[in-house]
Image: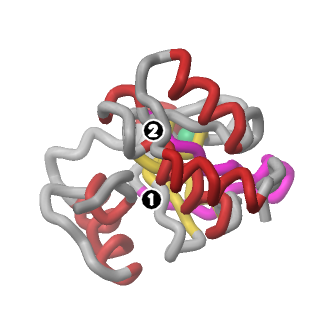
């Protein structure tokens, strides 16, 4: 079972399996005659690469989904992300970005903690919270960490970092 959903589960009506399918789904959205265009770019319909002066977005977990915030200063929409795909597209402004993900090791630990919570409470911003912060939140909110999981986390003493 998927603990944290990602781009594969969030772009278009079907679950996707490859990067090529994600791009095809984005292109299908843009080509749909009922698509009104990107609201934060004058309803234009073509997907463009993000401008170099914009910050690279960092992936975070929100309501059990990998997302990132669009860094186009005129937009700030939310984007679906996937670790296996460097790019995330903002369907509010029509730019796509190269996304920074937390390391796989840190993400696995975070997900082990988050999966003990209901989906709505599975939120993590790796720029602001390390594994210890997530453990503390679990305890404070009544989602205790089983001893074995906690020992593994403490043994690794994972610092806050992204790659
Ligand atoms: Zn945007």
Q: Name the mark nearer the viewer: 2 or 1.
A: 2
Provide residue 153's location: percent of width, then percent of height: 66, 54
Give the answer, above or below, for where 90 lies relative to 40. Answer: below
125 and 131: which is toward the camera:
131
Q: Looking at the rendering, in which quadrant would you find the N terminus?
A: bottom left
Q: Is residue 94 visible?
A: no
Q: Is mark 2 within 8 Å of ligand 1?
A: yes
Magenta stretch secondary structure, dominant: loop
Q: Is mark 1 within 8 Å of ligand 1?
A: no
Q: On the image, numbered disc 2 is attached to which residue?
A: 92
- Which numbered circle lies on residue 46? 1
Q: Residue at x 47, y 50 (%)?
A: 66
> Is residue 43 magenta-colored?
no
Q: Looking at the rendering, in which quadrant would you find the C terminus?
A: bottom right
The quadrant in which residue 35 appears is top left
Q: Residues within 10 Å of mark 2 (few under 14, many from 20)?
A: some
Give the answer, above or below, for where 132 lies relative to 111. Answer: above
User: Between marks 2 and 1, how big is the CA–CA gap?
Assistant: 12 Å
Q: Is 147 placed left or right of 71 in the picture?
A: left
The quadrant in which residue 63 appears is top left
What residue range appears in magenta?
46-62
């Amino acid at each position: 079972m998927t603990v944290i959903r990602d781009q594969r589960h969030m772009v278009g009506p079907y679950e996707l399996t490859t990067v090529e399918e994600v791009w095809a789904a984005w292109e299908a959205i843009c080509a749909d005659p009922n698509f009104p265009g990107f609201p934060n770019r004058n309803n234009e319909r073509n997907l463009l690469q993000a401008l170099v002066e914009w910050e690279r977005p960092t992936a975070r977990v929100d309501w059990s989904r990998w997302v990132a915030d669009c860094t186009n200063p005129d937009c700030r929409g939310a984007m679906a992300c996937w670790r296996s795909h460097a790019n995330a597209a903002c369907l509010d402004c029509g730019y796509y970005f190269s996304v920074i993900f937390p390391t796989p090791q840190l993400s696995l630990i975070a997900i082990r903690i988050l999966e003990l919570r209901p989906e709505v409470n599975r939120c993590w911003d790796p720029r602001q919270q390390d594994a210890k912060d997530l453990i503390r939140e679990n305890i404070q909110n009544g989602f205790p960490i089983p001893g074995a999981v906690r020992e593994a986390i403490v043994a690794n003493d994972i610092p806050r970092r992204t790659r």
